[in-house]
């Protein structure tokens, strides 16, 4: 494979990235080739060292998604970063998807429970099918709603920390892959 | 956003403080949802014509024990909050030799229940039954030395324990453990659970027996003497144990 074929292939795989990002990466790879030529190394050697253009592009895409998600922490951004990291290989599917899915389900459970407590007065009214509930269980309802609100606020605050932790973990996974 | 969260936090803390003070006062007055009361209901059926017993409950655990006399005695005992005291009925009926005992919860919806803990004890006189059937949702089931030809025991999430002399056993639970302890195995034993362990114990080693032991990730351990290649001797009763993740054990008592 020649240098141009390699770079053209890489450009094709980098298409999901914004043009500026694509240009930066291609420029960086051109530099690698030029430096190698200057040092008297063959193109084959450089290509072997740089790796499959498809995998290189996937890694770049994962790095881009992680960076993007880090700028504006949101669930959709984090999910895109997770998917991009997962696409790097079967190993990542296990070490990324399983912990992420489990922790996300746990977080969703906490939000669900908080919501359950907040709407508990409605549930208690359905349960007892009587307005007398308001006098007998007013204090219980107040406590459940209060606990639900506190849990909800805690979960909202923790969510930002959680997104940050997920992105750190993804960066760590990328580092491990690079070392390999 | 931050101001809104701060105001919500203040509201939440205030609600919790009001709830603690209010519930403490109501508790002292004996009228809070945290005041727990004892419940005890007893019903009897004459056992002369009875050849089968069906026990069914969606709440609490079940204990079936042998008793003296000629009446089947069902007792529902336990504790629950004051408002639920009249919500439970113990219904007993006898029709064509089948005694039915059922714990009925009147209210259809139960989203929040501070405390309810019940046990249904059914005492059965010594006469031999054709069939003893017990069904629970989440409660554990214990069957003592009550004589029946066939035991049908099912629970969704509860554990099952049988301490019997002999008989045909069909037991099934989704997540609970199942223990069947017998004096001797002379009828088929068919037991299944998704995640629990299964143990079959026998005081006397059968002269013949064949087994079908199936588990995905559990261990199988049969320590009966003369047990080889899934059987003892030729023919005999079938012991069919199935668990997805639990261990399967057959041993001598």
Image: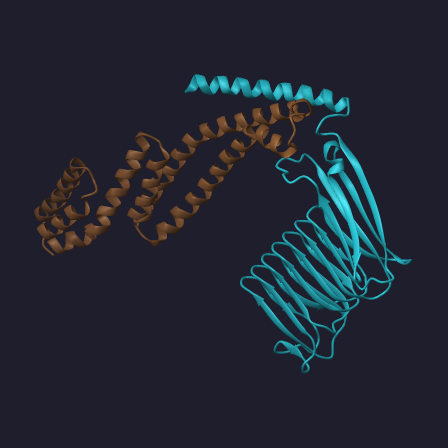
Asked whether B193 or A56 is in front, the reply is: B193
Q: Residue furthest front?
A: B96
Please tell me which residue is depicted at 69% across the width and 23% down the height of the picture.
Answer: B23
Q: In which quarter of the image is the C terminus of chain B?
A: bottom right
Which picture quadrant has residue B19? Answer: top right
Residue B97 coordinates in the image, percent (x, y): 80, 62
Colour for chain B in the figure: cyan
Q: How many marks?
A: 0
Q: Is residue A75 left or right of residue B142?
A: left
- The residue most toward the right is B69
Residue appearing at x 34%, y 43% in the figure: A82
Question: Furthest-bottom residue in view?
Answer: B234
Q: Measured from the top left, where is residue A169 in percent x and y?
A: 38, 40
* Side (left or right) of A143 relative to A84: right
User: Does residue B219 sit above or below B142 in this rendering?
Assistant: below
**Can you say whether B148 is above or below A127 in the image?**
below
Identify the chain drawn in brown: A
Nearer to me, B236 or B204: B236
Give me the residue at 54% from left, 61% from top: B217
Q: Position of residue B166 (x, y in %)?
A: 77, 69
């Amino acid at each position: 494979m020649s240098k141009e074929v390699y770079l053209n292939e890489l450009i094709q795989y980098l298409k999901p990235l914004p043009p500026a990002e694509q240009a930066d990466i291609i420029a960086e790879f051109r530099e690698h080739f030029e430096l190698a030529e200057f040092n008297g190394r063959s193109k084959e050697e450089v290509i072997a060292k740089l790796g499959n253009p498809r995998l290189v592009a996937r890694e770049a895409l994962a790095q881009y998604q992680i960076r993007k998600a880090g700028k504006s922490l949101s669930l959709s951004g984090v999910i895109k970063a997770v998917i991009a990291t997962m696409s790097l290989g079967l190993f990542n599917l296990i070490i990324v998807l399983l912990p992420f899915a489990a922790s996300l389900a746990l977080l969703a459970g906490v939000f669900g429970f908080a919501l359950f407590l907040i709407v508990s007065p409605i549930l208690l009214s359905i349960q007892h099918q009587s307005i007398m509930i308001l006098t007998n269980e007013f204090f219980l309802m107040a406590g459940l709603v209060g606990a639900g609100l506190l849990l909800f606020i805690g979960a909202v605050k923790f969510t930002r920390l959680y997104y940050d932790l997920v992105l750190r973990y993804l960066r760590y996974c990328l580092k491990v892959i690079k070392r390999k | 956003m931050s101001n809104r969260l701060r105001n919500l936090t203040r509201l939440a803390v205030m609600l919790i403080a009001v709830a603690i003070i209010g519930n403490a006062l109501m508790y002292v007055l004996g009228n809070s949802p945290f005041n727990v009361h004892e419940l005890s209901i007893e019903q009897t059926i004459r056992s002369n014509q009875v050849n089968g017993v069906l026990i069914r409950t969606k709440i609490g655990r079940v204990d079936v024990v042998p008793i003296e006399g000629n009446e089947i005695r069902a007792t529902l005992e336990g504790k629950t909050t004051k408002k639920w005291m009249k919500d439970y009925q113990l219904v007993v009926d006898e029709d064509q030799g089948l005694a039915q005992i059922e714990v009925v919860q009147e209210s259809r919806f139960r989203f929040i229940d501070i405390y309810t803990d019940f046990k249904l004890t059914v005492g059965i006189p010594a006469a031999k039954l054709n069939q003893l059937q017990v069904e629970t949702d989440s409660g554990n089931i214990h069957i003592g030395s009550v004589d029946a030809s066939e035991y049908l025991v099912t629970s969704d999430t509860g554990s099952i324990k049988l301490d019997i002399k002999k008989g045909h056993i069909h037991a099934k639970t989704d997540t609970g453990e199942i223990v069947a302890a017998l004096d001797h195995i002379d009828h088929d034993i068919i037991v299944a659970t998704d995640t629990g362990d299964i143990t079959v114990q026998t005081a006397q080693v059968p002269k013949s027996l064949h087994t079908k032991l199936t588990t995905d990730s559990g261990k199988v351990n049969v320590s009966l003497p003369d047990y080889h290649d899934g059987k003892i001797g030729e023919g005999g009763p079938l012991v069919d144990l199935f668990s997805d993740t639990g261990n399967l054990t057959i041993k001598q008592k």
